[in-house]
Amino acid sequence: MEDDAPVIYGLEFQVHVIDFDDENNIINKTVLLHQAGEIWHISASPADRGVLATCYSQAADSKVVTCAAVWRMPAELEPGSQESPEDAASPAHALELLCLLEPAARGSTACVAWEPAGDGKRVVSLADSHILLWDLEGSSSQATLASSASLEGKGQLKFTTGRWSPHHNCSQVATANDTAIRGWDTRTMSQIYCIESAHGQLVRDLDFNPNKQYYLASCGDDCKVKFWDTRNVAEPVKTLEEHSHWVWNVRYNHSHDQLVLTGSSDSRVILSNMVSISSEPFGHLVDDDDLSDQEERRLEEKSQEPPQDSVIATYEEHEDSVYAVDWSSADPWLFASLSYDGRLVINRVPRALKYHILL
Amino acid sequence: MAAAAAAPGPGSRPGDSPEGPEAEAPERRRKAHGMLKLYYGLSEGEAAGRPSGPDPLDPTDLNGAHFDPEVYLDKLRRECPLAQLMDSETDMVRQIRALDSDMQTLVYENYNKFISATDTIRKMKNDFRKMEDEMDRLATNMAVITDFSARISATLQDRHERITKLAGVHALLRKLQFLFELPSRLTKCVELGAYGQAVRYQGRARAVLQQYQHLPSFRAIQDDCQVITARLAQQLRQRFREGGSGAPEQAECVELLLALGEPAEELCEEFLAHARGRLEEELRSLEAELGPSPPAPDVLEFTDHGGSGFVGGLCQVAAAYQELFAAQGPAGAEKLAAFARELGSRYFALVERRLAQEQGSGDNSLLVRALDRFHRRLRAPGALLAAAGLAEAATEIVERVARERLGHHLQGLQAAFLGSLTDVRQALAAPRIAGKEGPGLAELLANVASSILSHIKASLASVHLFTAKEVSFSNKPYFRDQSPVTPVSTLCAEARETARRLLTHYVKVQGLVISQMLRKSVETRDWLSTLEPRNVRAVMKRVVEDTTAIDVQVGLLYEEGVRKAQSSDSSKRTFSVYSSSRQQGRYAPSYTPSAPMDTNLLSNIQKLFSERIDVFSPVEFNKVSVLTGIIKISLKTLLECVRLRTFGRFGLQQVQVDCHFLQLYLWRFVADEELVHLLLDEVVASAALRCPDPVPMEPSVVEVICERG
């Protein structure tokens, strides 16, 4: 189990690898130094758990520039190795720089996204108004710009965030700039759809439904979470208005896509059950049982009242704005949230709901 | 003691003697006493040996029927001691005396009555004797009378028989004469046009002629009559077909024809066909009134025409038909119903076309009156022709028209509402002429409210016409069942809810405007290389200005609202609180990089005790609440934006100055100044955290700069 979290910490920038032992409820933390600058965005490679990409800001010539780079954790500290946790006093290890994702035209990189199903060789970075596709070679030690595209329009357009879709053979990337959401085809680097004014204000985050290829969730400064069908972007499929301030993060559960997690600067984390638009709206229709039973089962299931979309739980452990939430990649019932004051909270999906979904 | 109770003493009253059905009761009582005696140890035999019940046949009973003085005396002498004997003797003597005196009194009292009764009886005896004589005389007289009477009737018998015969012959002769005269009479009647008379004659003669048609003379008469009748029928038909003479006369014709034995089926058809012709005429005239050109007569006149012309005609036809063809049974009634249905539907179509032309007009009273007439008129045929369902159709039309009217009014109301809103918008957007103050918000609000209210009242008044008591259709389910007016409470709740949403939206929008301003100002500035602050940034002044403007705007419409008590203090105190809290190290320790943990800890502890701020919370209907909402949104935005930036030393100081400035001016707008204080503190603390070289400005300098601004 692993959770990477950027923490602003005096003038020393660190990456903490948090190891959560589910059985004993013990949290272990490994601190890695990130010497390049303060981290604004972090994403782990899907293929190599020792590799991660960060966007960090550097003060240069009394200017702040945000760069992106790919790093490797020191081998012995890789999560999963059975080494006992470091003592807090002992000198922290530093991350090992693999390569810089340096755009030709210098701009501030807002976000780095790995190809979700790939072998960790392809990365997209968003720098100002450019979307850049990188090929990593030589075990990520070298990054070459494969292709790029840029936003055309009035004023200074800046990407704020982006997600790589796990569907369509990983050929789609969604990006957000100001109030618009755009979809890109990575093969041609051309725009495939655009949701103008997806939110009333800035779009903060996006996530793809892992099981339904056209479904996209977005959240923003208008306190709303919206669910889109990218085939018809005129209207959102569904809108949630549970938060009372900007929603910074939205995340689909990796396996049960009715579970949606949102974090907001109203200091709350909300876990919602979006049954009506999930890939398993009425539970599993087909079981392993023989076919003759199936008819009966269908009838039974039809007679049942379909469950309603609802808020499962509101977590109020944070005292300040929550800036990041994510599901565990190993246990689908576990998630963590991180707030401004550096508090990391790990929660589980309520047991009753878990059994309801499973059984 | 039981025996004493049961035995009748010598002085017992006559009523006490147990006789008849009561004889069983002592028997039972004795049994019960026997049980008691058994209990008290008295022997049964002793009890039984005593003569306990008085025997009805007891000869010793003084009052009994079988009293025998000898036996009684003998018994007394044998059984009683001397003293008792003496006692009973005196007792008896006393009783005898009493009885004697009683008897004497009775005799004296009734003596007079006896005397008068004797007199009366004597008189009666005399009278009866006289009467007997008279009765005998009466009987002999009666016998004489009977004798005479028998003789008279015997003499008159013969003549009476002859007179009767003659009378019969006379009647027959008159009948025959009638028959022989019949053809000429009929001809005359036909010539004179007295068809009714002719038909009556014919009817009277027909049966006789039928019966005696084997006699040649009668046969001839019958033939003649038939010829004449045929002519008569011909003429009647002719008249009937000409038809111009109006429904009652036609009905008469039909009646006569029926009496002449014409086939009813055919007549029925013809009658309806004629009626149809007439009614269609009416419909055509109605249609002409409708015309392609704008309708000349108003709707009331139109329905009056329709009512008197068509509906009246239909009524007449129906009444005549039912009278004439009652014998036709259900088939005839069905025919009439179909007829009425068809014509009725055409009439309704016309009425509906006419009513449709009324839709545009604003006057309900005329329409309601017209509908009322229409509905009232149709109730008569409705009763007559229940099967045709005209009344239901009429009610349906009325209902539909009423619905359309309601729709029309609703539309009107909506248009008026939109219109007044547009007016307000224009008034707001119109360029102000210098020196001339535009209408105030409160005035506009009052205008809008009063115009909406008057519109609603007018509509309600005109819609109420439909449900007025005297209108004939007001008791129909559609007009009666629905609750007359939406309850005021519902309207108020709806209005309140809308106002709340509107206000919340207003707060969001205004908050967003200021937020955008702040966000842009934070995002676009290069905070690292900024110069030492000399002034409050213009954007902050702008924020305060805008907030003041909003305050004025909202103040026009809403009350002040409630503040927390502490805010009634002067800004001086507020300021000191603010600066002192800062000096006490709300974030001062964070400037020493050596102790970053303390800062976090401190702020965390602080937050633990401060309440969570709901930024986009619903607002109340007062100025303070509205402004609190707007300021909360703005400051939270500022906070979030500041956290995304990196600040140089002077950048931090600028933020410090800006926040102090905001603190100076914003506290007066909010309900709880602690809130502004908290959020601004948070902003400065966040900026300090985001600053690699956090050196704060001296509070006194900050104050000076702010006061200068």
Image (tube, coloured by chain):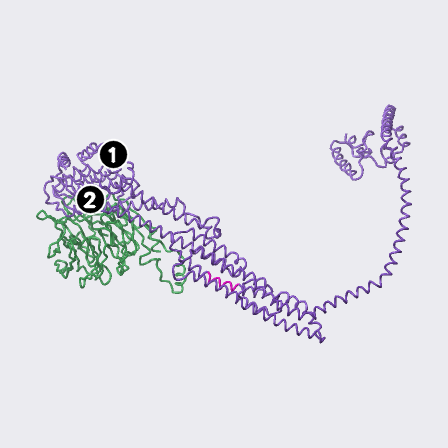
Task: Tell me which chain the residue with mark 1 is part of.
Answer: B
Above-or-below relation of B700 to B209: above
Which numbered tag is attached to residue B638?
2
Q: Is residue A22 left or right of residue B336?
A: left
Most common SS among magenta residues: helix
Q: Does residue B283 show up?
A: yes
Q: Residues within 10 Å of mark 2 (few under 14, many from 20)?
A: many
Per the image, label 1 sits on a secondary structure element best described as helix
Quadrant hosting residue B565:
top left
- The nearer-to-camera label among 1 and 2 is 1
Q: Mark 1 points at which residue?
A: B567
Q: Which amino acid does label 2 sit on?
A: Leu
Per the image, label 2 sits on a secondary structure element best described as helix
| Quarter of the image that includes the C terminus of chain B | top left
Q: Residues within 10 Å of mark 1 (few under 14, many from 20)?
A: some
Q: Which amino acid does label 1 sit on?
A: Ser
Q: Which of B60 and B214 is in front in this view?
A: B214
CA–CA distance between discs 1 and 2? 23 Å
In the rendered image of this protein, which colour is used for chain A? green
User: Does B342 lie within the magenta span?
Assistant: yes
Q: Where is residue B597 in the image (x, y as percent from the top left)?
A: 18, 40
* Residue furthest left in the image: A61
In the rendered image of this protein, which colour is used for chain B? purple
Tell me the residue at 91%/32% (across/down): B70
Task: Tell me which chain the residue with mark 2 is part of.
Answer: B
**Which stretch did the figure color magenta?**
B337-347
Going from the N terminus, do you reach mark 1 or mark 2 first?
A: 1
Q: Position of residue B137 (x, y in %)?
A: 91, 48
